[in-house]
Image: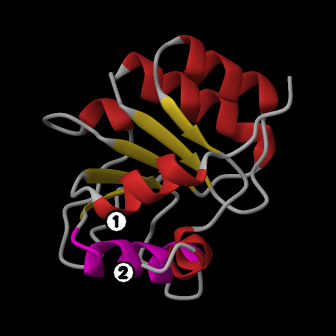
Amino acid sequence: MTHRNDPALIRRLLTSRGRWAVVGLSGNPGRAAVGVSRFLRDLGMEIIPVSLKGDDVHGATGYRTLAEIPGEIDVVDCFVNSMRVGAVVDQAIAEGARAVWLQLGVVDEAAAERAKAAGLDVVMDACPVIEAPQLGL
């Protein structure tokens, strides 16, 4: 079954303050994750950087894995390629995240189905910076 994003879900995620673990957010200013996470932070989200090196970004402590993050995670925002995102989604499920957001160009139908089956909300192949203005945010 092909996943379709729900505009009401996107609106809820972008307007409800939450803790967003941004997987693929490193200190490299040339990466899209840096600007998108700044946008999310400016919307009022708590940003938690997750990268291979565990870089601190935007003044927030970085981690190398979702399992290292203390406390609850509302959204796992995935800036990893489609071939690797399934493992991140599985970690999000294991850590009890409430939602996964697969960034623009990141598509894994099987991972989206696993997340939905586990009770997580799913947004796939979308960017908050693009979605917010379309929703009037």
Which quarter of the rendering shows the C terminus?
Answer: bottom left
Which residue corresponds to the image point at 62% horizontal and 77% vertical from the top-left?
A: 130
**Residue range of the region highlighted in magenta in the rendering:** 32-44
The residues tagged by marks 1 and 2 sit, at their Cα atoms, a distance apart of 15 Å
Rendered location of residue 38, percent (x, y): 36, 80
Which residue corresponds to the image point at 50% horizontal and 50% vertical from the top-left?
A: 8
Above or below: residue 55 compared with residue 71: below
Whether residue 99 is visible here, answered yes or no, is yes
Residue 55: which disc? 1
Rendered location of residue 26, percent (x, y): 45, 69
Which secondary structure dominates the residues rendered in magenta?
A: helix
**Residue placed most toward the observer, 84 or 46:** 46
Mark 2 residue type: Arg
Which residue corresponds to the image point at 39% horizontal and 53% vertical from the top-left?
A: 13
Q: Horizontally, is 11 left or right of 17 in the view?
A: right
- Kindly indicate the quadrant of the structure image that contains residue 134: bottom right
Rendered location of residue 120, percent (x, y): 47, 26
- Kindly indicate the quadrant of the structure image that contains residue 1: top right
Under circle 2, the secondary element is helix
Residue 38: which disc? 2
Under circle 1, the secondary element is loop
Rendered location of residue 64, percent (x, y): 37, 46
- Nearest-to-viewer mark from 1 and 2: 2
Residue 92: which disc? none
Q: Is residue 13 magenta?
A: no
